Image (tube, grey):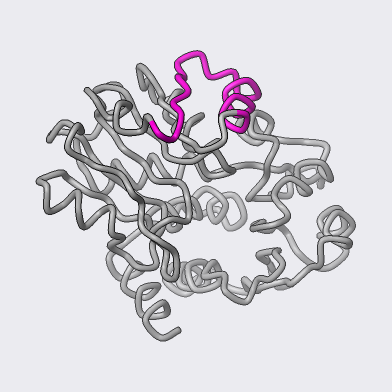
């Protein structure tokens, strides 16, 4: 019997998860395995997620706009999914039940450790631009990694307050958008979790002059691979890490859970995904 896994989203044609997982399936010689896209409208998402086994799937990834729906549809969750109330990975457990997991924060941290050897979260305050779903996952992961302070910079204060309260971020400090420059003082990490800088979007409008030269700058946007923020940071002498690795590393735990092999994130895989991006 073919072990099938899917990525669920609406739309889902843009997802590069099949490129990643099918590359690993071939690389590690996993027989009778397949990873496909499954476009599911919001109205049918909960039913589809609960009925994965009936549809012939042993697991799934979940992308927008279904991450919160998946959390509500499943009865079992790992600690991070329970904290974020969002699921990006679904695994069939030994007893046949489905468990929702969230590996976004893991992917973010693993990417920094991979691309910036020696990086540690406890070196100083982290500044996060944005307060959406990605910001939630990253903030939780950074706190778990020992960041001494997490500064949330967002235009809407209410959204920042909700993020801090719901995640119980004891190390968090809310900074109003106009005061973003002040948040950079003595920071060790700057993260853009917004869509600013993405192809077709305006750039992050932030003066990096107050950011210590030792600070690492990263962006979850990976189209383009070097955003305007990363280019300005690199030119100013900062170490920078692009966002592609977060996508690649967040896929690792799910693949291991489904197929019993822990895959490596390699330059070969990066180039494969970059080639797909360039071709679109």
Q: Per the image, is 89 magenta? A: no
Please give the range of residues in magenta: 158-178
Q: Position of residue 238 (x, y in %)?
A: 15, 44
Residue 65's quadrant in the figure? bottom right
Is residue 181 positioned above or below 8 on the image?
above
Residue 47's quadrant in the figure? bottom right
Q: Position of residue 151 (x, y in %)?
A: 41, 26
Q: Per the image, is 173 magenta? A: yes
Residue at screen point 28% across, 47% down: 114
Is residue 13 positioned above or below 206 on the image?
below
Q: Position of residue 271 (x, y in %)?
A: 31, 73
Residue 53 in sight in this render: no
> Is residue 52 or residue 221 the one in the foreground?
221
| Quarter of the figure with the N terminus | bottom right
Residue at screen point 42% across, 40% down: 129
Residue at screen point 12% across, 53% down: 235
Q: Is 92 situated left or right of 79 in this image?
A: right
Residue 43 in sight in this render: yes
Residue at screen point 46% across, 72% down: 23
Is residue 20 positioned above or below 264 on the image?
below
Q: Is 81 situated left or right of 128 in this image?
A: right
> Is residue 124 or residue 198 the one in the foreground?
198
């Amino acid at each position: 019997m073919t072990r099938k896994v899917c990525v669920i989203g609406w739309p889902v044609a843009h997802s590069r998860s099949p490129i990643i997982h099918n590359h690993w399936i071939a690389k590690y010689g996993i027989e009778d395995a397949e990873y496909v896209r499954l476009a599911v409208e919001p109205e049918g998402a909960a039913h589809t997620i609960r009925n994965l086994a009936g549809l012939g799937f042993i697991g799934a990834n979940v992308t927008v706009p279904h991450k919160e729906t998946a959390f509500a549809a499943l009865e079992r969750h790992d600690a991070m999914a329970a904290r974020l109330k969002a699921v990006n990975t679904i695994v069939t457990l030994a007893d046949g039940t489905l468990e929702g997991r969230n590996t976004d924060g893991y992917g973010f941290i693993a990417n920094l450790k991979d691309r910036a050897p020696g990086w540690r979260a406890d070196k100083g305050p982290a500044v996060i631009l944005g307060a959406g779903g990605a910001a939630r996952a990253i903030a939780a992961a950074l706190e778990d990694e020992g960041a001494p302070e997490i500064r949330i910079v967002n235009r809407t204060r209410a959204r920042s307050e909700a993020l801090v309260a719901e995640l119980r971020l004891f190390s968090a400090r809310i900074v109003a958008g106009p005061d973003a420059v002040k948040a950079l003082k003595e920071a060790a990490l700057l993260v853009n979790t917004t869509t600013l800088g993405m192809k077709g979007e305006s750039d992050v409008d932030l003066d990096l002059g107050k950011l210590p030269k030792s600070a690492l700058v990263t962006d979850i946007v990976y189209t383009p691979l070097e955003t305007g923020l990363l280019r300005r940071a690199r030119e100013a002498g900062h170490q920078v890490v692009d966002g592609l690795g977060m996508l690649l590393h967040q896929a690792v735990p799910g693949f291991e859970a489904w197929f019993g092999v822990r895959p490596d994130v390699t330059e070969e895989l990066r180039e494969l995904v970059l080639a797909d991006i360039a071709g679109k």
